[in-house]
Amino acid sequence: MSLYCGIACRKKSFWCYRLLSTYVTKTRYLFELKEDDDACKKAQQTGAFYLFHSLAPLLQKSEQRYQAPQYSLLELERLLAKFGQDTQRIEDSVLIGCSKQHEAWFALDLGLNSSSSLNASLQKAEMEIELKGSFTDLRKALFQLNTKDASLLTTAQALLRWHDAHQFCSRSGQPTKKNVAGSKRVCPSSKIIYYPQAPTRISIPSSQMAPVVITLVSDGTRCLLARQSSFPKGMYSALAGFCDIGESLEEAVRREVAEEVGLELERLKYSASQHWSFPNSSLMIACHASVKPGQTEIQVNLKELEAAGWFSHDEVATALRRNNPYTQQQNGTFWLPPKLAIAHQLIKEWVEKPSCSTLPA
Ligand SMILES: NC(=O)C1=CN([C@@H]2O[C@H](COP(=O)(O)OP(=O)(O)OC[C@H]3O[C@@H](n4cnc5c(N)ncnc54)[C@H](O)[C@@H]3O)[C@@H](O)[C@H]2O)C=CC1
Ligand SMILES: [Mg+2]
């Protein structure tokens, strides 16, 4: 087993970006902005903002086409000042993506009640005159926009709507606080962390199921297994991760693999699903995936994983036959999740049919 314990070279950010594909570096850059408020604040300085009013995106017409204009932080500050608004309102913005060159994109709604500024929301008509555009119902706007803007604004609206609906903690009743990127809200009093899908964490049994993708990556002869520091000693599993709001399952699979081990998928194939209760209700959606032969160098994201590695078919087949893993801990071999876990089923499926045919990712 060639185990990479992940030497992440810290250069300004979590990883060096050399050797990683554009897609992987973009994914890891966004992960960093979601995890690090200072990095996200810094990204706002050079980023671009899309504007909404009461969940309707601003569109401008140029020639026969509509487009969604972008504003710099400076332009936004000037616009707010012109209408007597403090710049605190910018704290209501959410991170929605970035360019290949790592220009971060944000969305800000000028019409929803602000949780960061005491100012009232801005009047729609006045803003449309000032901005020479119209705040357009998103369903209508989707017919007028290019695919990139349509997908971006759909994610933006979902995130802005979620934040607007989760201003208070369902346990303490206290106002919740958004992180800079808007990838979560925290209640300072109950300490519950809310993620844009379902309330999660600790004591609040979620009434919804958070969608989670779990993926067994193969390079044709080996499969990729990983472990978190929270796992029992010696246990390795498939890569798993919560879907982000606005994401398809395929996008979540690709993003999680890029974020956690720095690999770009070539193909993936749905396998099965499972309800999973730990730590809260999740809907596990399991897939097989493959990487291009020769593009198998793992770069472990040490903020998420303790280790990851490629395991041969024989090693994994032997591990599957171990029925009492706890005895294995003594002699330091690795072991796999219990039969009940869909990770076990996914791994067993691969051992029985190593060449699970996969579809383009
Ligand atoms: N049934 C099975 O075979 C397996 C199930 N799992 C489950 O999959 C889930 C996701 O696995 P991880 O690698 O931990 O996810 P992950 O790779 O997304 O990392 C967890 C982080 O995601 C963030 N996050 C985003 N949305 C979240 C939400 N709704 N709830 C909680 N955290 C959220 C948090 O920052 C958290 O620290 C876990 O709950 C785990 O129990 C994991 C492996 C096997
Ligand atoms: Mg994970």
Image: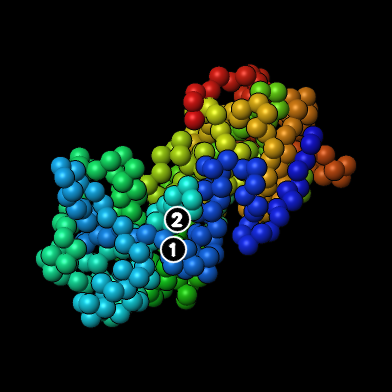
Disc 2 to disc 1, C-alpha distance? 7 Å
Alpha-carbon neighbours of circle 2 within 10 Å: few (<14), some, or many (≥20)? some
Disc 1 target residue: 46
Q: Which mark is residue 103?
A: 2
Percent across and percent down for residue 131 are: 19, 63
- Kindly indicate the quadrant of the structure image that contains residue 96: bottom left
Which callout, 2 or 1, points at the residue further toward the start of the chain? 1
Identify which residue is drawn at 31% across, 62% down: 71
Count of marks overlaid on the render: 2
The amino acid pointed to by label 1 is Thr
Specify the quadrant of the image occupied by residue 293. Answer: top right
174 vs 314, left or right, is left
Q: Residues within 10 Å of mark 1 (few under 14, many from 20)?
A: some
* Residue type, numbered disc 2: Glu
Residue 230 to residue 203: above or below: above
Which quadrant of the view contains residue 86?
Answer: bottom left
Looking at the image, residue 319 sits to the left or right of residue 102; the answer is right
Residue 255: tell me if it is visible. yes
Secondary structure found at label 2: loop
Residue at 62% of width from left, 24% of height from top? 349
Classify 200 as above or below 328: below
The percent position of residue 97, horizontal first and vertical second, equals 42, 52
Q: Helix, strand, or loop for circle 1?
A: helix
Whether residues under marks 2 and 1 lie with C-beta atoms below 8 angstroms apart, the answer is: yes
The residue located at (15%, 56%) in the rendering is 134
